[in-house]
Image (spheres, helix red, strand yellow):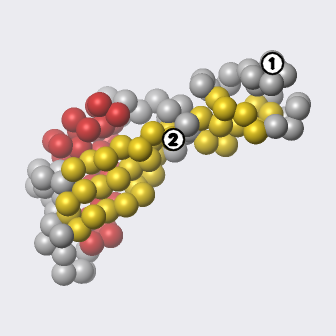
Amino acid sequence: MHEMALAESVIDLVEDAIRDKDIAQVKSVVVEVGILSHVSPEALLFCFDAVCRDSAAAGARLEIVRVAGAGWCLDCGKTVPLSERFGACPECGRHHVQMTAGDELRVREVEIG
């Protein structure tokens, strides 16, 4: 389950961001997770709750924002939605699509209190 390592990395980023600041508690963390990233939101939520217990994020809420997949077709030159990695272009049917969104895992916001 790589979500455990991802949750630990999110906590590390949060703790790095608040280090040397007078911040007692993190209320929530918002992360963007692409639908093509192979990250299970449910597993990430479970792992986040487990790894944040002994951190400044103890008791914090994790909000996951899903990011749709998108790509740019090298053949027809259009930006197209993607529902799978290495999928065909929905416009021309060819498989020369470069992914431009949907693969990310990004901490977007940390709410402190």
> Which residue is more in the foreground, 57 or 62?
62
Among the two numbered marks 2 and 1 on one chain, the one whose residue lies closer to the N terminus: 2
Q: Secondary structure at mark 1?
A: loop
Q: Could you tell me if the residues under marks 2 and 1 are in contact, i.e. CB atoms within 8 Å?
A: no
Image side of residue 84 versus residue 60, left or right: right
- Look at the image and tell me whether residue 64 can be seen: yes
* Residue under pointer 2: 67
- Residue type (three-letter) at the residue carrying disc 1: Gly
* Residue under pointer 1: 93
x then y, percent, for residue 57: 18, 58
x then y, percent, for residue 45: 26, 38
Q: Secondary structure at mark 2?
A: strand
Q: Residue at horizontal 80%, vertical 24%?
A: 91
Rendered-image quadrant of the C terminus: bottom left
Image side of residue 66 versus residue 72, left or right: left
Q: Residue at horizontal 15%, vertical 67%?
A: 25
